[in-house]
Image (cartoon, rainbow, N blue to C red):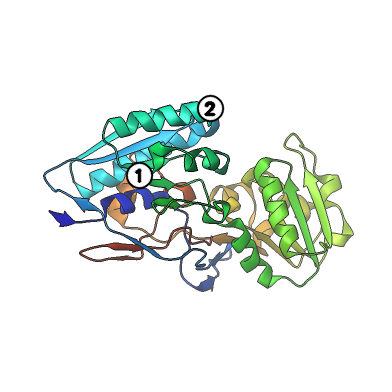
Amino acid sequence: MKHIILFILSIFIFLGCAAQKTITVDSVKKPKIVNEHYETVEEKEIEINFDENEDFKVAIIFPSKVVGKYANNTINTILGYLLYKDIKFQIETFDSQNQEYENIKNSFAQLKEKGYKKVIALYTKDALPTLLGLEETKETLVYFPLINKNEAINSYEYFIYGAISYEEQLKKLLMLSNEQNSMFYEESKLGNKLKNFYETIVSPAYLSKSIRRIDTKYKKLVDDENLNESTLVLNTPIIKSSIILSQLRVHDIKPNIILSTQLNYNPLLVSLTQFEDRVNFITANSIEKTDNVLTETLSLLNADINYNWVNHCNCISNTRHNCRCFKNRTNW
């Protein structure tokens, strides 16, 4: 019997985490990237015992009607990682369809009946009250890549949270502000969440404008002299952000600096905009460089860990007996 940390490593491969404590500027043809380490939760040691003669077993549970798009990424990432480690393993998926009490309870009952004690759960924070009230989740090591530690007021010792802290990202980015703050945000669940974080940090906001998800015209939004020399925060997804950056230049509006969270850390931004659009654009990032062989192995399964924060993980130290991991470290 030997102590290893395969479960922690495999689940944390899609944790969005911070990189080095530096601010770096890529070449002028790319957006500027802010890499920052935030320790937003306590360091925790978890010791996992694993018999090398037994298969490594992990269950993946998800509500397909809520987070269907993340399910395949998660499964492929785990498969790729375990293939990279060249170990025997057993993975089984459980679809609870949604986040209703009975469905979650039944799914956890099934996986526990089959002997799974290590679980990756693709639930949102809305499911936490149910998860914390179930006997089936007690004494089960569960990793939540879509829930931030700060969203869990109460928790079990063996619940691990991996989602990034957009609030900490914004705090870091706004250290670059000239105090003439302005913001664009999309009227969506995430957009409103980012808006609320922004407003807790910047009070009062110099200028704030919303964009509906169905909006396609941006002239009225960007053609505003008040944006000149401001610190503009884009709490908008990649396509909208690309259009905004281009339209600002078209209408000769020149913010002092343009900031964004990891929401826009995506190479697609470079192909959708021109060099002039990105001169003063800075985005936060928590994704560190990973082993090249691991990256290639995962890419064969269409699992991106270079730009997809859900798929990315960082394990701080690895000893013979335990793995010391910073959960929820953010940039990101």
Name the amino acid type tagged 2.
Lys
Under circle 2, the secondary element is helix
Q: Which mark is residue 51?
A: none
Q: Residue 257 at what x, y percent from top left?
A: 71, 66
Specify which label sits upstream in the sequence, 1 or 2: 2
Q: Residue at x 84, y 63 (%)?
A: 206
66 and 156: which is toward the camera = 156
Tell me if I can see residue 4 in this picture: yes
171 and 304: which is toward the camera = 171
Quadrant assignment, res 29: bottom right
Quickly name the residue at label 1. 140
165 lies above or below 43? above
Q: Residue 90 at what x, y percent from top left?
A: 24, 36
Q: Which mark is residue 65?
A: 2
Q: Is residue 309 left or right of residue 264?
A: left
Tell me if I can see residue 302 in this picture: no
Q: Residue at x 77, y 54 (%)?
A: 248
